[in-house]
Amino acid sequence: MSRPPATSRQRKVLTGYFLGLGAVMALWGARMPAVQHAAHLSTARLSLVLLAAAGGMVAGLTLGGRLARPEQLPALTLGGGSALAGCLAALGQCTTLASLLLAALVFGAAHGILDVALNTAAVRCQHAIGRPVMASLHAAYSGGALTGAGLAAATARTPHSVIFLLTGLVLVVLVLATASHTLVLCGPGQAVPTGPGDGEGGRVLPTGKLWLLGALAAATLLGEGAAADWAAVHLHSLHATTTVSATAFALYSAAMMTGRLTGDTLTTRFGAPTVARAGALLSAVGLATGASSDSASLALAGWAAFGLGLSTTIPSLITAAGPGGPTAVATVSVTGYVGLLVGPALIGALATATSLSTSLLLPAFLAATVAALAPKALEKPTR
């Protein structure tokens, strides 16, 4: 049976937003050295800017969880998308610490609000379609991140202020041009399974299950943070060339996108608990093998296996939190981002005390923990 046209439009709109979000975040991260240089920031002061963005994101996730009711999803999506793109344009023009702190704070808040709105709408869209689509939507984010990283590399000699301004303006125009299509995000037939709820008609998830979902999200995103900040350093420590070292995170990201493109089909056939467990085991074995080897080739293969294995975990965890409503989605997201934020620093501290190869066994161990606990976290309620 074919999907209603409105549902197909909803999925296309969400795919576009996830794609744009990934591109913005990758572009911001890839041109960070240029931002630091333009404002003459020390490493410590740059850390303050990143902390402001992180604080704004936590605030945005929390606020988004309270506001993301069905009838408010279009406004939150439009507002969050426009604000994020506008802040990217503004960040490119900031040349002082004070202006960067303010812009980064709003940028993070817009990111958080948009994140909750998109994932809440994605849960509802998936329920309306009647089969898993969350992984493919998150694949769009990964594709956007690769696009953003490619754009940053291709325009490395162009001032970041120009790239941020042009990209931000183009995205704002796209958000406004597609505003009428965004209004279908709270269309009919999108209610999640109902019961005594949190204000949206969704179930109140047991506290233990909600925090388990959050803990697994934190463990997963700690691994993603480790890959983003330490994959290239790991290859460099194995005496790989600069080009090969830079390939590590790109290979990880490509593997993650590939896994997400196939994740919905696998989830439909085998179920989320089985797919998540098998993937997390692949991640644990792959990274542990790569980290324990002195071979750059094995290390690259390990990072690829790590990305492929973890690709469906976050989409599955968000889906499991969805019936609890936007507050549950926000709780899992906030807890998960704690892992993303503290993970790289924790890996660095462990590497200082031991070695980088040894410290990378932490995300491998956490992936094994996800494999052990995912079936319990993702099991469907009996009633």
Image (cartoon, rainbow, N blue to C red):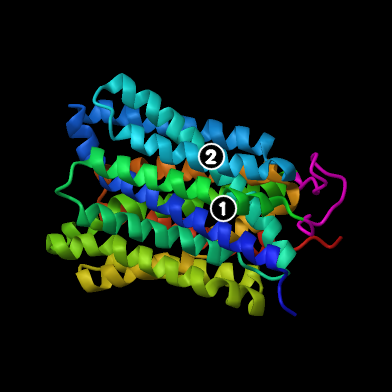
Where is residue 77? Give x, y as percent: 58, 44
- The reply to whether the magenta stretch includes residue 296 is no
Quick one: 322 or 369, which is closer to the camera?
Answer: 322
Residue 31 in the figure: left or right of residue 172: left
Task: Find numbered disc 1 in the image and state the secondary structure of the residue it sits on.
Answer: helix
Where is residue 361? Give x, y as percent: 37, 57
Q: Measure the alpha-carbon separation of dots 2 and 1.
A: 26 Å
Task: Find numbered disc 2 in the image and state the secondary structure of the residue it sits on.
Answer: helix
Magenta residues span 188-206
Quick one: 240 or 10, which is closer to the camera?
Answer: 10
Q: Amino acid at mark 2?
A: Gly
The mark found on residue 80 in the picture is 2
Query: Which residue is outermost to the top?
Result: 98
Residue 126 in the figure: left or right of residue 195: left
The quadrant the C terminus occupies is bottom right
Residue located beneath label 1 in the image: 216
Residue 367 in the figure: left or right of residue 35: right
- The reply to whether the magenta stretch includes residue 191 is yes
Residue at (45, 30) in percent of width and height = 106
Q: Is residue 347 visible?
A: no
Q: Is residue 247 above or below residue 324?
A: below
Q: Amino acid at mark 1?
A: Leu
The quadrant the N terminus occupies is bottom right
